[in-house]
Image: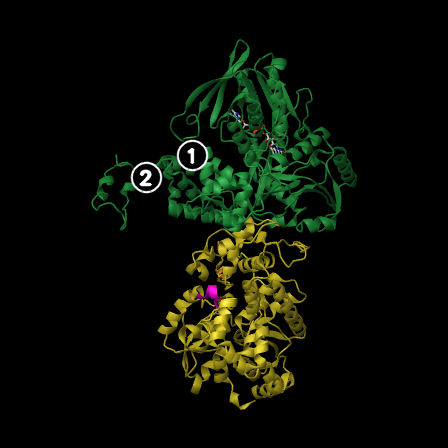
Amino acid sequence: MSDTGPQTDFDPIEPNTGREFEPVDVFPATEEFDLRPGADSCFKCSACDTSCPVAEVDDDFPGPKFQGPEQWRLKRRQGHEIDDSVMSCSNCMRCDDACPSGVPLSQMHNTARGEYVSEQMSKTSVEYWRNRVLSNYRTSAFLASKVPRLANVAMNFGPARWLMEKTMGVTKEREFPEFASTTFREWWAERGGADESRRRARAHRERLGLDRDADKRVAYFHGCYSNYNTTEVGKAMVRVYERYGYEVVAPEQKCSGTPMFANGMLADARRHAEVNVSSMADLVEQGYDAIASCTSCSMALRQEYPELFDIEGIETVAANTFESVEYLRIHEDLKTDVREASVSGELAREFAYHAPCHARNQGLERQSVELFGDLEGAGIEDVGDSCSGISGTYGWKEEKYETSMEIGEEMFDHMAEADGDVGMTECPTCAMQMEHGTGYEIRHPLELLEEALVENPQSEP
Amino acid sequence: MGSPPHIAVIGGGSTGAGIARDLSMRGLDVTLVEQGNLTHGTTGRMHGLLHSGGRYAVSDRASARECIEENRVLREIATHCVEMTGGLFVKRPEDDEEYFQEKLRGCRACGIPAEVVSGAEARAMEPHLAKDVEKAISVPDGAVDPFRLVVANAASAIEHGARIETHSTVRDVLIEDGEVVGLEVEHASGAGKRVHGTEGGREEIRADYVVNATGAWAGRIGEMAGVDIEVRPSKGVMTIMNVRQVDTVINRCRPKGDADIVVPHETTAILGTTDEEVEDPEEYPEEGWEVDLMIETLSELVPMLEDARTIRSFWGVRPLYEPPEVGSTDPTDITRDYFLLDHAERDGLEGMTSIVGGKFTTYRMMGEEISDHVCAQFGIDADCHTADVPLPGSEDFTVLRDYMDEFGLRSPIGRRSVERLGSRADEVLTTSDPNPTVCTCEGVTRAEIRDAIEGSGSDLNAVRIRTRASMGNCQGGFCCHRMAGELHGEYDEDVARQAWDELLQERWKGQRHALWGEQLSQAALNYALHATTQNRDRDPADGDPVDFTAFDGGARSSEPSGTAGVATDGGGQDGD
Ligand SMILES: Cc1cc2nc3c(=O)[nH]c(=O)nc-3n(C[C@H](O)[C@H](O)[C@H](O)COP(=O)(O)OP(=O)(O)OC[C@H]3O[C@@H](n4cnc5c(N)ncnc54)[C@H](O)[C@@H]3O)c2cc1C
Ligand code: SF4
Ligand code: SF4
């Protein structure tokens, strides 16, 4: 992945909808595609079933082969219902990765789930509203961030959590993530926004002996979590990129849609996607690349958007989106720089690294281990290829909590076995699960990169 | 008259089954004999189009009128066999406008509801249609499952006292004093429900009247009776696609030609067809180029077909007939109408009539006409009720129920099962036993397989046509052994094994002309699985029965240790 070959190797396999195909009201007034032809590629080998973490622990879950190609093939255009088991799929997308034959599994699950929710799930049910609240995390986080300290206490207040479980089906077993007192965007604005970033990038270019006006510009898709919760990740991204001479912009953005796909809220997801695509598309036109520090966000922009929506500019955005470490590995000699660096202090630790499923889907599951293996002062160990089990909002649902923890079991064990007692992962919800299951503190690779490569990061506001 | 006359019907296709039902409903005593399983002949190898009559509206208006009439009847009496998909006659820019107008006039003249839709409207209905389609005529074409329909007719006949013998070949027509008095029949495996490999033998079936409904084989029966019947068998190829690219019947609107129709059928779409005269209804060449040509031509209408997965191809022979004096040279010129040949009038041979030609869609009408004719021979005045009494499975029944909860099935599987079973769903699917899905491609559960076995005995190909099990994209790769497993208990290992072999062979046969692309991957996987897990690469059917007792019972075996050695000294499966 680190060579500079075509950067768009990542090619979510197109469903066989025929070259001449142009969707004309297949299902009038809905966002749905006819995915039956996608079943053509399936030869029933069951590789997807054997890699599904939910099927492994939940005997009632029929697995991706049924959920995807079989269910679609049996479907008729009208009057055929989606089986409710689609709501048990966590959207980890492992099946997508496992299929040797290019069946568009996650597209099938997402579309089926969307259809199930819009047509079969009662809009007055607690489940529907719980899912909607969970998947619109951005809205809750936005409100909470206005009163972060109060929110931190209130959200984890015992009786309140008991009530939430009883009335909304949000498990009380988990601790809500802490909200930062200053959001990433507040910090960014205060710091001087894009102008300040350009100034800093230029200074670094000079230091590096590069052209002052080098064409090194990226648009940061920070997502909700590094904005409201782990702002250190967002800040680390900005500083590491500037250190390599990149100017960063933080365009207007909404939720990537990941939690909405997983909950079948395709209309919500589409609304958010429209904003994201339109602001990213403009920048991409101007020569920016889109960078995400959350692997599910990059996954959404790269694969799910073009699979599910037909929005102007979506293909260009998808082709120019990268995960933050991946991008630097492609364009900079990150490996050498890390090998020559060292860390001391707070982050001079042994890390137990878990690769998120969505990183795996983008071929990124080894990047942190390969990178930090050579870093002096720190150590990293891969805790294996199991799924963390939380899959975003999935593990927050009262009825899915047990399943989620059962799936996570293997990862917890491996973390306990590993030398380190600090966890590392790119995905914020995997981080929650890792912390929940082991009590470890969890860090993002960008934080360690910052520590290794950026001088004096804490000296700026 | 004392007991009702006994009528022997030869041929278990749509025509024979329709006649058997009609006659038995009128109170006659009927025996139907069929050399294979039901639908073994052309009926099991047709396109599945429930004609609106549109296809014949220009060339053969009499047929067109019959079609629309029967189309309406079948929608009522065979709801669980028919899917009213609607159909389109699509005009591409290069197709003749005059013919389009003629088609429209023809439909209207024959009472076939027909509307012109624009290219854009047609594409809104069927998004995969070619972009340059100009316009289309919409007609009430439908899709019909020939297997289910024939099985339902046979079931109804049995309810009315008929005897249905499958795997029973007519070897001779018995004639005494210039009159047909019965048939000599060879049972492949014993009278009654089929049992493999044992019993069998000849039987003389005496009958007061014989109806020859053997379609393309009618001439053979004629020979046995010493009369000439000039059936002109004409073959046609059909290719089954893995999924439905269209949900409406798509016809090309141009004068007769090859490869001009796509019919959605259950989970699949079937492409057709060609028309070429052959000598022998059983031995004719099946050639790959016919399939290639068809896919290529139909891609002009539905471009995605070109790259889509095909799961198998098959050929059928039309039992075309024309009175010898007409002398058409091109088989497409031969009428699609049917002919009733009373051999008494025609050849001076009393006691037998043949029915030849016709279409599946008009099977009931043919049955009615010949039944009238038979009744007339005996001076019986009984009304025909086949047009108003629904077939078993199509009785009054509400489809809008929550099967998933009711039968504990996943929704698409419950829905498919109920569509197949119709009003028999309750009876078949209500079970206290575990009901796993046996065929995952088509969503067929164990309960439905068991019901089919009850109806057709140990012949798994007959179970297949009743249920669609093994007819999906893996073509039996993952379910044939499970189906065979369901035979066990009622039937012993030998029988189950033979039935399994036959089913597998039949499944492979039809894939020969689809082995490229995805289906080739599928076949390779099936082959590897069957070779490595079932020892299929060394043909166990040739060997002696497997000596199961020679296998180690394993740690959990309840047998006391020490008995394992007993069977190794050549003991048979029952330890004898
Ligand atoms: C390619 C093709 C596509 C077609 N598509 C359509 C369509 O879409 N719609 C439509 O309406 N029609 C269609 N037809 C026409 C239709 O299939 C036939 O007209 C109809 O199925 C004929 O049925 P049948 O019962 O007369 O003949 P068959 O189904 O051939 O039945 C005759 C039976 O007699 C049995 N038999 C023969 N000899 C003996 C013997 N000695 N002893 C015992 N049994 C014997 C045979 O095994 C056979 O099962 C199509 C035909 C072809 C060839
Ligand atoms: S997305 Fe994950 S949970 Fe869902 S079916 Fe695929 S592997 Fe299973
Ligand atoms: S892995 Fe792909 S080809 Fe294999 S069963 Fe699953 S969807 Fe089908």
In the rendered image, residue B342, in percent from the top left (x then y), is placed at: 62, 17
CB of mark 2 near ligand 3 (< 8 Å): no
Q: Circle 1: is it few (<14), some (14-19), or many (20+) Cα within 10 Å?
A: many
Residue A398 among magenta residues: yes
Q: How is the image coloured?
A: by chain
Residue A385 found in image quarter: bottom left
Nearer-the-camera pick, B21 or B467: B21
In this rendering, does residue A385 appear at all?
Answer: no
Placement of A99 over or under B407, stated as above or below: below
Q: Residue farthest to the bottom?
A: A459
Q: Is residue A28 above or below residue B340?
A: below
- Residue at (59% x, 33% y) in the render: B390
Q: Which residue is mark 1?
A: B458
Q: Position of residue A324 (x, y in %)?
A: 54, 75
Q: Between tags 2 and 1, which lies in front?
A: 1
Chain B's colour?
Answer: green
Q: Secondary structure at mark 2?
A: loop
Residue type at numbered disc 1? Ser
Residue indicated by mark 2: B546
Structural distance between the alpha carbons of marks 2 and 1: 19 Å
Q: Residue furthest left?
A: B562
Q: What is the chain identity of the residue bearing mark 1?
A: B
Quadrant of res B360: top right
Q: Of label 2 and label 1, which has the lower sequence position?
A: 1
Magenta residue check for B204: no
Q: Which residues are magenta?
A: A395-401
> What shade does chain A have?
yellow
Q: Is residue A161 visible?
A: yes
Horizontal and vertical percent position of residue A421:
39, 78
